[in-house]
Image (cartoon, rainbow, N blue to C red):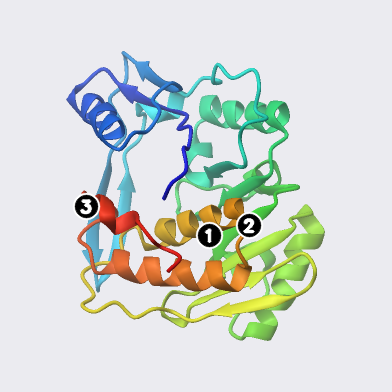
Amino acid sequence: MGYHPCMVSAIGNDEAGQEVLRSMADWGMSAEQMQTIDTKPSGAVQVELKDGEPVYDILQDRAWDYIEPPAVEDYSGYSYLYYGSLAYRSERTAKTIRQIIDQSQLPRFVDLNIRPPWFKESWVSGLVDGADWLKLNHDELQRLTQMPCDTRENVRKAVDKLRTAHQVANFCITSGSKGAFLATSDGDGIEIAVTQPNPLVDTVGAGDGFASVLLAGLISGRPLRQVGDAASRFAGKVCENHGATCQDKSFYENVFT
């Protein structure tokens, strides 16, 4: 989308890892902070569709469970630190995330995924305290707050509870076919209508697609309504595509128009 993210991750010394590096090179991405763990295979996720919804098996004991701190001395050239809670499942990678949080002092965009067995509520404070943005769905919000999230007003109340408990500035609450809700630190809330895919192929990667456009819009300083609508359109387009990504580079161009 015109930006230059620095990916901090780890791959195995295997063909899957080499495929990752080739793909990153093809897309012009920096692999400077990619690590190779010789004793572990590259990460893999098995996805099955059940009743039209993806079910994920994120295979255990993979290279990305052993990410070491990156060799970065100056974080001033970066806009955000973006990470997901799934990476927190291993103590080695969790320690690395905490170290980057402390050393970088960057605004943080956190993607919370409550997917047993790869989540513990005891992790929440370390993951989200003081974050600039927290993305989660309304089911996850209900679980964390133990409050009903069946109406938009109830979602607002649950967001207020979580904001007070963890000092999170802004929230992105996704609700599948019901769209999304952006709750900002100034108390405003922006309703984002869902973009219906035509045709619907699968929903794998739709949430990550939404987050990527939201983050790109925040970096560029665009109006939040425009950014939210663009994120919805892009998530809908992802649902028209098989899998989470597309090899056609034009797929990722002009997402705000």
Which corner quadrant of the image does residue 242 belong to?
bottom left
Q: Residues within 10 Å of mark 1 (few under 14, many from 20)?
A: many
Q: Position of residue 240 (x, y in %)?
A: 24, 69
* Residue at 52% in and 45% down: 84
Q: Quadrant of the C terminus?
A: bottom left
What residue does disc 2 label? 221
Which corner quadrant of the image does residue 7 belong to?
top left
Task: Residue 80: tell me if it is visible.
Answer: yes
Q: Amino acid at mark 2?
A: Gly
* Residue at 65% in and 28% down: 75
> Does residue 76 lie above or below 238 as drawn?
above
Mark 1 and 3 residues: CB-CB less than 8 Å, in contact?
A: no
Q: Residues within 10 Å of mark 3 (few under 14, many from 20)?
A: few
Which residue is more in the foreground, 195 or 91?
195
Q: Amino acid at mark 3?
A: Asp
Task: Give the SS element for disc 1.
Answer: helix
Q: Amino acid at mark 1?
A: Leu
